[in-house]
Image (tube, grey):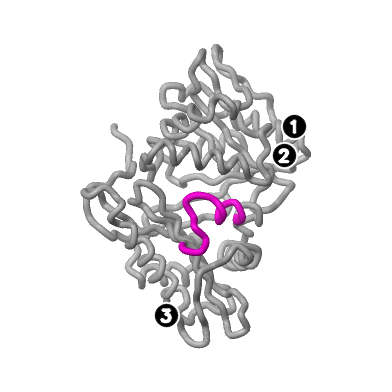
Amino acid sequence: METPFPYSAGPAKREDIEEIWRLMVDVNLAEAGTPGFGLTEIENWLTGEPIVIGEDVLVVRDDSGAIVGVEIVDSRPPFVRPHAIGGVHPDHVGRGIGHAMLTWAQTRSMERIDEAPPAAKVLFLTFTAGDHEHSAQTMRNFGLEMVRYFLDMEIEFEAKPPHPVVPDGLTIRLFDPETELDALAELTTDGFRDHYGFVEGPLETRIEWLRHWMTQSDHDPSLWWVVEDGDQLVGFNLCEPANEGREEVGYVASLAVLPTHRGRGLGRALLLTAFNRFYEMGKTGAGLGVDADSLTGATRLYESVGMSPGSRYALWEKVLRDGEDLATRELDA
């Protein structure tokens, strides 16, 4: 990658992960006012499928050798929506580093375009802090279009959360990793099929993603719940014990209910199950991320249990190859 003088760029190494994390925190604090990432989150992301740290993570260094820019390309089957996540240290913005990193990320994404289905549209995606104009202008200059906002939402526990009311005939219980991994992978696919941007990939990829998640150093099996209806799993709530590195706040990482079981209060019951567990653990609140214009009305659910919107992030996209869009964009009437 060509970089402006006096900077240099090269592949990241595992020993760079903590410095990458510190940089990403500095960037997010400057642009969104929140840390954005915990160290464990970055470690787990950069050391598991589909990221190959020596190929998919680029770092830019100044003349002292310090990392001042990072770009991460996350591309997974079926390779139609490669994501680039990155940032430049606030002391080094406006010098062409961001544009150079986007150029590298787009080139890296193009290298795998032949792995996408032949007739499928391929989009290059990235995120910025929703109200950071310099980042937005960088994206526009690169030919990207802003298409959607996503929100962080959070609640502070002023008292013990309400007890969850589980619909009749259903049971919320802990997930059994020994016997239910394949079923959970199928459930996460079916539960998110009608969410904006969803693209169905190989089931094995999702199984490996869950398996890697369960090996993370901060994984807490007491924070993974499923909903049982007879012998069928119909919902899930997979949580983590910290939010953006803040140990005092729990994180609702992935929650969904099958369409056949929505509208009965099950999503609310799953949330309150997590909130009660967080409260028992001594957490002062909980957070999550959500599509600001959720096709399934998730934002209204979260507001109904007392959660409030915080930081806003913009999703940008650019067409790398035209064709059939395999992603969910809207729901049938």
Segment tinted magenta in the rendering: 42-55
Q: Give percent across and percent down for residue 137.
A: 41, 71
Q: Callout 2 environment at 10 Å: few (<14), some (14 to 19), or many (20+)?
A: some
State whether residue 316 is above or below residue 23: above
Q: Nearer the viewer, mark 1 or mark 3?
A: 3
| Count of marks overlaid on the render | 3
Establish if 191 lies above or below 40.
above
Q: Nearer the viewer, residue 78 or 284?
A: 78
Rounded to the nearest angstrom, the CA distance separating label 2 from label 1 is 7 Å
Q: Looking at the image, which residue is at 54% across and 12% down?
A: 169
Q: Nearer the viewer, residue 257 or 173?
A: 173
Which numbered disc covers residue 160? 1
The residue at 56%/78% (across/down) is 61
Q: Secondary structure at mark 3?
A: loop
First in residue order: circle 3 vs circle 2 = 3
Label disc, if present, on residue 2 of the rendered structure: 3
Report the quarter where the C terminus lies.
top left
Which residue was labeled with disc 2?
Answer: 157
Q: Is residue 44 left or right of residue 246?
A: left
Q: Are marks 2 and 1 in contact (CB under 8 Å)?
A: yes
The residue sitting at 47% across, 72% down in the picture is 134
Q: Few, some or many C-alpha atoms within 10 Å of disc 1 (few <14, some 14-19, many ≥20)?
A: few
Q: Amino acid at mark 1?
A: Lys
Q: Amino acid at mark 2?
A: Phe
Amino acid type at circle 3 is Glu
Residue 7's place in the image compared with 13, above or below, is below
The answer to which image quadrant residue 199 occupies is top left
Is residue 29 in view? Answer: no
